[in-house]
Image: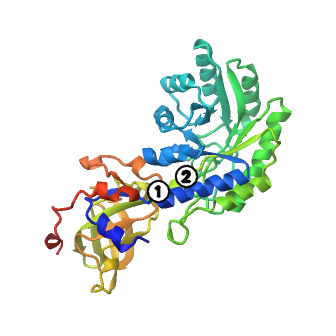
Amino acid sequence: MLDINTIEKLDKIATPFYYYDMDLFRRTVDTASELAQQHNIMVHYAVKANVERRLLEYISSKGFGADCVSGNEVLHAHECGFPAGKIVYAGVGKSDKEIYNALKLGIEAFNCESLQEIYVINEMAHVHGLKANVSVRINPDIDAHTHKYVTTGLYENKFGISQHEFDKLIDILKKSEHINFIGLHFHIGSQITRVDEVFALECRRVNEIVAYFERNGLTVSNINLGGGLGVDYDDPDENPIADFGTWFRTISENIVRRDDQKVHVEPGRSLVAQCGTLMSRVLFVKSGETKNFLIMDAGMNDLIRPALYGAYHKIENLSASQRTFYPTHQAYDIVGPVCESSDVWGAGRLLPLSVRGDLMAIRSTGAYGQVMASRYNMKDLAPSVFSDSLEDAAEAVDYFTLSSRA
Ligand SMILES: Cc1ncc(COP(=O)(O)O)c(C=O)c1O
């Protein structure tokens, strides 16, 4: 994946850090952009996946909108070049302050997730003499066949409004004078890999729900299908760019739309996961009675996905890939430094013989990685390093000399 030249440069930087392959990132965004245009689909980037300013500035420059889930995300997206008129704001718990700021900014839409939220937004818009654009997040009761912590479309989820409240919802929307109802919003889950099957199912269910709302006197101008396109965590080099083609084609073939209806999607993971790599170093090699441990300097505070969801990330030993004198492979339990038993990168991973100081790549970590980092155990936050400005980042690892690696 990385050439020797790049590995040599990376090896000079103090670990842990997030490395972003800007060429792959731009190719991914450009691919999504071209395919979306072909299918007349509007893309709103789900900012929660990665809030790195350089990434957001490029995404906004391509004309994408932003899907945000907090007041600070709304403000940050706006600062990174997304016009207010292209920012949508979802989330089950918006505070009054967050609503007020977004109202003032004049965002494209609040994606409301409960009846009470609609009352509150209507009231606040009234008090401030404004009109709020509102889409309503519907819970379509669909199984996305993904991890239980990232499936969001099943009945009685905390997200969205379910079918038993539809009539009450329609009534409220009609009576709320200070909101402008613009459409319906859906999102059924994340890391969806059965793309054609699951998204076709979503579209068919969405068609029924849109028709129900229109039969009952509301015009649904925006149909927002959410995000969820999965990436290949097992083999990021084989599939560096997610299958936007199948996703958009499936939507085009299955969604029923009039010319005056816009179709939106909100990809997060699929735009940024594969361009990111968490770079770490082997601190110690520990031989147990039955196992060998590699203790790394990156931990669950840098990337919590394995501890939180049992997520798999491919791990490579970049230093060993340059050696010719360590031919053997060995099974390792790869762990982090944090004082929690769940701080494990992978158990029984087969790697070339690894030694103290080896540079390790934890792949596909551009999405839901750095954004969830914490300072647990008072660890420093891992900074961002970009492939197109590697020299700027070369903070020499002089405290980690080759002799100390032995
Ligand atoms: C409402 C909404 N839209 C979009 C996304 C982005 O999903 P993904 O990163 O799987 O594309 C999420 C993720 O949680 C979400 O909740």
User: Does the closest atom of ligand 1 sit within 8 Å of the Cβ of label 1?
Assistant: no
Q: Which residue is mark 2?
A: 150
- The x and y percentages for residue 228 are 60, 53
Q: Residue at x 76, y 53 (%)?
A: 252
- The x and y percentages for residue 88 are 60, 36
User: Does the closest atom of ligand 1 sit within 8 Å of the Cβ of label 2?
Assistant: yes
Disc 2 residue crowd, few under 14, some 14–19, many 20+, Cα 10 Å: some
Q: Is residue 113 visible?
A: no
Q: State the SS at label 1.
A: helix
Image-based side of 323 in relation to 97, left or right: left
Q: Which residue is mark 1?
A: 309
- The x and y percentages for residue 231 are 55, 62
Q: Residue at x 55, y 50 (%)?
A: 268
Say which of 187 and 83 sits in front: 83
Q: Are circles 1 and 2 on residues that touch, CB within 8 Å? A: yes
CA–CA distance between discs 1 and 2?
A: 9 Å
Q: State the SS at label 2.
A: helix
